Amino acid sequence: MEKLGREFFDRDTVAVARDLLGKVLVRRVDGMTLSGRITETEAYVGRVDKACHAYGYRRTARTETLFAPPGTAYIYLIYGIYHCLNFVTEPEGEPSAVLLRGLVPVEGTAEMARRRFGKEPEQLTSYQKKHFLDGPGKVCMALGLTRAQNGLDLTGEELFLADDGSPRPSFHTGTRIGIDYAEEAVHFPWRFYL
């Protein structure tokens, strides 16, 4: 597998969101490797997107990571319980990122099942198997990602993205989920999924 470098992230956010589909997210934690193939993403572009936390270049303690160099992990908490992993894109100072919405397991499935459900994979119900990693909070729980990893360099060894040479998958485009407050940005076709 070839690790994706900073130049991959230092591009148009919508293009990065599309190009991440099929790539592999790798997390090394507690002497283990956990990984999954990306199946769903959403793009957020601060300069024009009312759904972005840093819309209009709004800087707060929460959004500061969005202004970091491309290839930085932006992890925030929603509803006070779920963590969401984003990949910072575009040049430093441009608050943009791609939200990771879904994965399918590649390596470390048993450990991810224990982290998500406290069970071994063979003990999961059909519903649990179907919805194993199909949401941003589920992905972070399975990979053990919290605000403690906010700001992590995605070109390092603890958390990174890789291309394993698989052909680019065909995908669907749609509107983003859970952003009803975002006025015209509700209609941006910036969600990509397999």
Image (cartoon, rainbow, N blue to C red):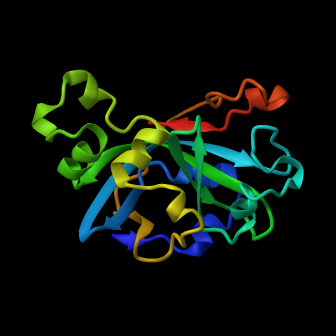
Using the image, determine if residue 138 lies above or below residue 5.
above
Q: From this viewpoint, which residue is outermost toward the left?
A: 122
Rendered view: 95 above or below 125: below
Residue 118 position (above or below residue 147) = above
Residue at the location (46% across, 36% down)? Answer: 135
Q: Residue 161 sits in which quadrant?
A: bottom left
In the displayed structure, does residue 78 sit left or right of residue 26?
A: right
Q: Residue at x 60, y 67 (%)?
A: 151
Relative image position of residue 30 (x, y in whole percent): 27, 68
**Furthest-right residue in view?**
56
Q: Is residue 147 left or right of residue 110?
A: right
> Residue pushed farthest bottom?
156
Task: Residue 77: name its quadrant.
Answer: top right
Q: Residue at x 59, y 74 (%)?
A: 6
Of the 4 image quadrants, the one containing the C terminus is top left
Image location (x, y in percent) of residue 44 = 70, 46
Q: Place residue 71 in its image quadrant.
A: bottom right
Q: Is residue 70 left or right of residue 51?
A: left
Depth order, front residue of 130/3: 130
Quadrant (top left/top right/bottom left/bottom right) for the N terminus: bottom left
Instruction: Tell me how many marks there are.
Output: 0
Closer to us: 108 or 120: 120
| Residue 96 image position (x, y, % from top left) | 72, 55
Question: Residue 169: x, y in percent?
Answer: 42, 44
Query: Going 78% across and 26% down the picture, which residue do you hit?
Result: 181
